[in-house]
Amino acid sequence: MPDNAKKSVQAVAIGSFDGLHRGHNKLIEALGDNSALIVIESPKANLTPARRREEFAKIPCFFYPLDIVKNLRGDYFIGLIKRDFPSLKRIVVGYDFKFGKDKGWDKYDLKSLFDGEIIIIPEFSFDGMGVHSSAIRRFLQDGDIYRANRLLGREYSIEAKVIAGQGIGKKELYPTLNLDITPYLAPAQGVYATRTRIGEKTFCSVSFIGNRLSTDGKYSIETHVIDEQIEIAPEKLRVCFIERIRDNAQFGSLTELKAQIAKDIAIAKSAGDACYLTLREDDTHARVVER
């Protein structure tokens, strides 16, 4: 957002907002009109890196590099915010908010540094768990897409560049698009029911993450778009993760592998063919599948 857009902002929430999950939504709900997010941008953000936060927050986001603000005294940081947002009347933060050099200032210091309204949002729990980006990362690294999506309030999605692959899939198995998902966090190795969005269209898909144990052993991330012929590979696409189908496994032949992929495709097709980037509490995909 351009700097002149800051002049009309009357309420801000401050944080890293990586993940833009249900807990973050509670901060956004407390903002009111003419509001924005102040995003402390870390290069380690890997759930909603760069400016995808604005897509999910649905309000303007203004980015402040962590490497710069982490060395400011707390009063200097709040002074910077007040100068940048001259109409500011309200600041919203989470219960564990800390800021300034060595995180030496916390939510209580805001009341002496800012003469407007301070709103402190308590820890938000969902499914009996505190909702934190660290918990979502842990579930993704464990391959627990169901719980990760529950805490996010939407399907975990990544944007990827399409890169060259082995070429075996198209010739002997099923054609796949090979992906570079940097800087996103990859879920655990395995096969997943997914939705792949190419341009404005969304397709049912099945995606693989892991070492190709049955061929060259190299690590890859690949998606097969089901029942579609992709004649020209796109430069970019988006993959939304719905359900983990199975672990990565080694097969004795390409024939055995192809037979298993056919089963994976059948499961993935039953997971749906639309990409829902926001979910109600009772919406997140969950079911028991006989394998």
Image: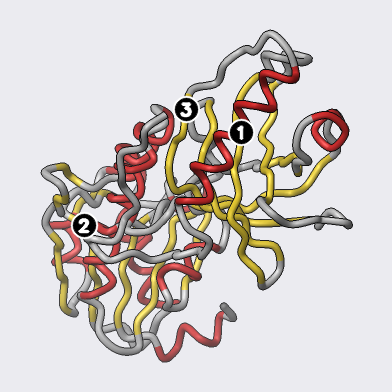
For mark 1, give the secondary structure: strand
Amino acid type, mark 1: Phe
Q: Which mark is residue 141?
A: none
- Say what secondary structure mark 3 lies in: strand
Q: Residue 94: percent from the left, percent from the top?
A: 21, 57
Residue holding disc 3: 246
Q: Position of residue 189 (x, y in %)?
A: 53, 25
The furthest residue to the top: 252
| Residue 208 - label | 1
First in residue order: circle 2 vs circle 3: 2
**Badge 2 amino acid:** Gly
Q: Estimate the spatial distance between the alpha carbons at disc 1 and disc 3, rounded to whole Å.
A: 10 Å
Q: Looking at the image, is mark 2 or mark 1 earlier in the sequence? A: 2
Give neighbour class at mark 2: few <14, some 14-19, many 20+ (Cα, 10 Å): many
The answer to which of 117 and 144 lies nearer the viewer is: 144
Check disc 2 and report the residue beneath it: 94
Q: Residue at x 16, y 78 (%)?
A: 117
Asked whether the residues under the numbered discs 2 and 1 touch, taking CB atoms below 8 Å apart as contact, a structural biologist would say no
